[in-house]
Image (tube, rainbow, N blue to C red):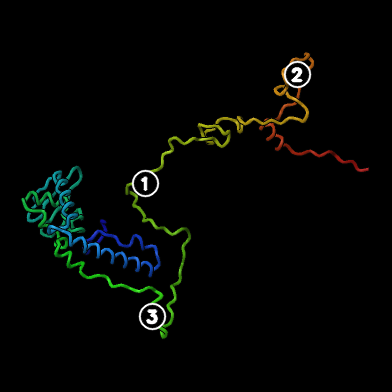
Amino acid sequence: MSHFSIRGHSDMLMILEARGKPILTMMETIRIKIMLLIVKKKEEADKWNGMLCPKIKKKVDVNIKDSLKCVPSHAGGDKYQVECGLDSQHVVDLVENSCSYKNWDLTGIPCMHALAVIHLKEEFPETYVQIWYTKQTQLQIYSNFVSLVRGPKQWASLSNMPPILPPPLRRPSGRPTKVRREEPDEPQTTERLSKRGVEIRCGKCKRVGHNKRSCKGEVGQNILVKRHKVGVLTQQQATPNQQEGTPTQQAALTQLPTAPTHQQAALRQKLPFKRKPTTVR
């Protein structure tokens, strides 16, 4: 808003919904929006009881409360210096209806800096509101309605006119941007989602409580791998009656081959495969 022209005296944006559409669709969207807005403003102005818009009167009352925090000082002529807190200092000109804060210049409604000066001079704030916010002016502005337009299928075609070709389109790389570019010193309003309550599981050891980067254990150390030969029972799978055997049988059970670990399996894969030498007869 700081870069808007003060000639229009309006802070309303009409192209936010239509700026990414093709030219005809964009113009039609803006036309319909303006058409509905004029009818709405005309109906609201008919219901006003006072001379000012109720919404504008409410904004002025809010600015009056905020102006109590400001300290105006006469700087000569019709110019005043207004201080509102630390490092907040603005210049107000009551003749030009201008403030360095630019809110009064843009909207036509006195800001809190201007209202502090108006209160110092003991004048009425309503006299410094621009005339287009009065009921009489609003009824005159919105008395002219937008003309209706038929659909594209009902448009008259011109045979003696060559077809209008679309301009050459040069599509840049990447996805087109729809969000404006923010300044480096602009405060970030987006909030990141909190991960409170989310269960973090490690991708290496599959345990809960840490991630893959901070893992200090072996890969897959809590995954039990059971590989047994068919018909051969290990010491854990043996029944109690079988475990209570002779010492020679218990020693034979302890010598049964066990399943290889992950480190042993990985080591076997890294070792070169040795083929048996072939003899030529």
Query: What numbered label is drawn on residue 190?
Result: 1
Q: Residue at x 17, y 57 (%)?
A: 53
Q: Quadrant of residue 78?
A: bottom left
Q: Earlier in the sequence, mark 1 or mark 3?
A: 3
256 sits left or right of 100 in the view:
right
Mark 2 vs 1, N-terminal side? 1
Read off the residue under disc 2. 242
Q: Position of residue 107 (x, y in %)?
A: 20, 58
Q: Is residue 174 left or right of residue 6?
A: right
Q: Nearer the viewer, residue 180 or 50?
A: 50
Relative to 50, say whether 29 is above or below.
below
- Residue 115 is marked as none
Q: Quadrant of the N terminus?
A: bottom left
Spot occupied by residue 60 in the image (x, y as percentages of width and height): 16, 52
Counting other residues with Cα less than 10 Å from the Cα at mark 2, is it few (<14), some (14-19), or many (20 or more)?
Answer: few
Q: CA distance from mark 2 to mark 1?
A: 68 Å
Total marks shown come to: 3
- In the rendering, at what x and y percent does residue 231 appear? 78, 28
Residue that carries the numbered disc 3 in the rendered image: 156
Q: CA distance from mark 3 to mark 2?
A: 100 Å
What kind of element bears circle 2?
helix
Q: Amino acid at mark 3?
A: Ala
The quarter of the displayed image where residue 4 is located: bottom left
Instruction: Tell me which amino acid carries mark 2.
Output: Gln
